[in-house]
Image (cartoon, rainbow, N blue to C red):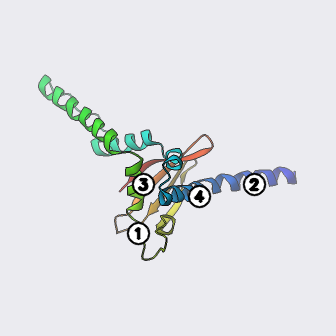
Amino acid sequence: MRSIVIIFLSLLAAYVALPYYTLYELDHAVMENDRGALAKLVDLAAVRESSRSNLMGESPRETPDNPVSTWFQDGVELLGKKAINALINLDWVRNVLRSKNDTSSNEKGSMLGNVSYAFFEGIDRFVFRVGQLGQQPVHVRMERQGWDWRVTALFE
């Protein structure tokens, strides 16, 4: 019985520690400009979809009777998707995460030194904040994908 409890507690500790370790890896990838490591830690498709839904809204749009208006709305949505796909890439993610690094309080300019909040938001969701509240921080959401934690959204 004791060994079962030890195994369970070890698994629980590993589960709790993994997103913090991923945060450490993300910090290292951002500081070292390691695109390969950053690509493994960021789900670009999810970040793009999150940004698209934030910019365009998730509410169902009303379909007007005018076909020209419908055509115009479809065009705006298509252009928005293309713009998001063109603008949101690994360099953009790295720059957003670097943008809140306060090197005066942090000698190396490490993102980790500027994280003011990091905790689970759900069983498969972890959020952290780079920067202080009231100073336009960046909120980052990570989600568990298999055994790995990956960045799925950034909110400025």
**Mark 1 or mark 4, earlier in chain:** 4
Marks 1/2: CA–CA distance: 33 Å
Q: Nearer the viewer, mark 3 or mark 2?
A: 3
Marks 4/3: CA–CA distance: 18 Å
Q: Could you say whether the residue bearing mark 4 is in a helix, strand or loop?
A: helix
Residue 117 lies, in percent from the top left, at: 49, 64
Q: Could you say whether the residue bearing mark 3 is in a helix, strand or loop?
A: helix
Marks 4/2: CA–CA distance: 16 Å
**Mark 4 or mark 3, earlier in chain:** 4
Marks 3/1: CA–CA distance: 19 Å
> Residue drawn 43% across and 72% down?
103
**Mark 1 or mark 2, earlier in chain:** 2
Residue on which disc 3 sits: 94
Q: Could you say whether the residue bearing mark 2 is in a helix, strand or loop?
A: helix
- In the rendered structure, which amino acid carries the disc numbered 2? Ser
Q: Is residue 126 among what the camera can see?
A: yes
Q: Nearer the viewer, mark 3 or mark 1?
A: 3
Which label was assigned to residue 132? 1
Residue on which disc 2 sits: 10
**Mark 3 or mark 1, earlier in chain:** 3
Label 4 neighbour load within 10 Å: few <14, some 14-19, many 20+: some
Left or right of residue 39, residue 57 in this image: left
Which label was assigned to residue 20? 4
- In the rendered structure, which amino acid carries the disc numbered 3? Arg
Q: Quadrant of the C terminus?
A: bottom left
Labels 1 and 2 touching (C-beta < 8 A): no
> Residue drawn 48% across and 61% down?
31
Residue 16 lies, in percent from the top left, at: 64, 55
Which label was assigned to residue 65? none
Label 1 neighbour load within 10 Å: few <14, some 14-19, many 20+: some
Q: Quadrant of residue 85 in the image?
A: top left
